């Protein structure tokens, strides 16, 4: 492998890291071997940053290590690299890539326990609600894929799907009403919930993502253009 190949590989890994930092659910689309390469890349970047931080603290004796960690950056600061490291490692450890929301929550809890706050863009509070995150599993096709894997006569399918995707047992109604789509106006039928569909549409438009075909077939997006 030539030097140019190595450089291209580094560039591609950097693109992956930027993408994951911006849209964590993109981890679902990344092969596990690439994730392992990303872990190694992050370790190299952390070592390089630590060396820079060391020199900075020698030169600026009034600064604390925590301040230097936050304010020394080579594309990412050390806190951000630790966030990416934990997020990717957690997604590797989980049994299923469908549980990306579970992975995010584990990482966020770890950050909170260590009093670490990431600077993030302002978010719509609605997007933190379970109903939005459940709707995302339909927008990505994850819920539909799981549903097809179960025998239709199996008991408790919708509860199992809710739990497997990282939601509560009590959320099974959203999966039941939405997967058994019959154009009913029950608010738990997410395809017919205009507030949810509008927010999913805006989210995907902002991120430049493509909605799953099954989702598109069951909602009317013309009203949101």
Image (tube, rainbow, N blue to C red):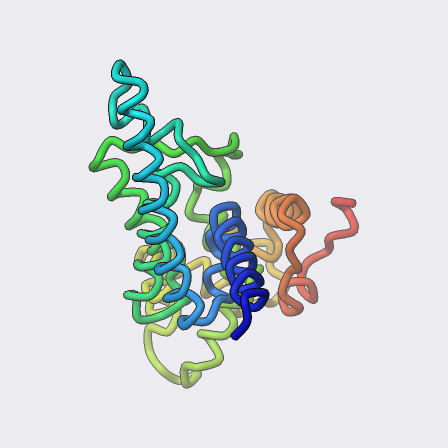
Q: Is residue 180 above or below residue 90?
A: below
- Asked whether the viewer can see residue 90, the reply is yes
In this rendering, would 110 be left or right of 13?
left
Which residue is situated farthest in the left direction here? 113
Q: Is residue 210 above or below residue 187?
A: below
Q: How many marks?
A: 0
Q: Is residue 83 above or below residue 89?
A: above
Q: Residue at x 36, y 44 (%)?
A: 48
Q: Position of residue 68 (x, y in %)?
A: 32, 27
Q: Residue at x 32, y 63 (%)?
A: 163
In this rendering, would 156 be left or right of 74?
left
- Asked whether the viewer can see residue 194, the reply is no
In this rendering, would 183 be left or right of 125?
right
Which residue is situated farthest in the top direction here? 62
Q: Is residue 100 above or below residue 195?
A: below
Q: Position of residue 59 (x, y in %)?
A: 31, 21
Quarter holding the C terminus is top right
Q: Residue at x 66, y 59 (%)?
A: 210
Q: Nearer the viewer, residue 183 or 111?
A: 111
């Amino acid at each position: 492998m030539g030097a140019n190949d190595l450089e291209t590989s580094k560039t591609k890994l950097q693109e992956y890291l930027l993408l994951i930092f911006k849209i964590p659910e993109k981890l679902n689309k990344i092969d596990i071997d690439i994730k392992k390469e990303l872990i190694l890349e992050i370790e190299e970047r952390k070592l390089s940053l630590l060396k820079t931080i060391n020199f900075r603290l020698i030169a600026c004796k009034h600064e604390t290590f925590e301040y230097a960690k936050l304010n020394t950056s080579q594309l990412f600061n050390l806190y951000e690299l630790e966030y990416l490291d934990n997020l990717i490692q957690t997604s590797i450890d989980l049994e299923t890539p469908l549980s990306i929301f579970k992975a995010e929550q584990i990482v966020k809890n770890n950050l909170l326990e260590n009093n670490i706050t990431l600077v993030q863009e302002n978010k719509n509070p609605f997007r933190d609600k379970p109903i939005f995150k459940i709707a995302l599993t339909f927008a990505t096709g994850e819920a539909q894929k799981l549903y097809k894997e179960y025998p239709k006569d199996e008991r408790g399918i919708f509860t199992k799907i809710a739990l497997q995707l990282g939601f509560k047992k009590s959320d099974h109604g959203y999966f039941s009403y939405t997967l058994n789509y019959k154009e009913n106006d029950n608010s738990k039928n997410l395809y017919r919930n205009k507030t949810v569909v509008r927010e999913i549409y805006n989210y995907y438009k902002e991120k430049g993502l493509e909605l799953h075909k099954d989702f598109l077939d069951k909602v009317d997006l013309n009203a949101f253009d």
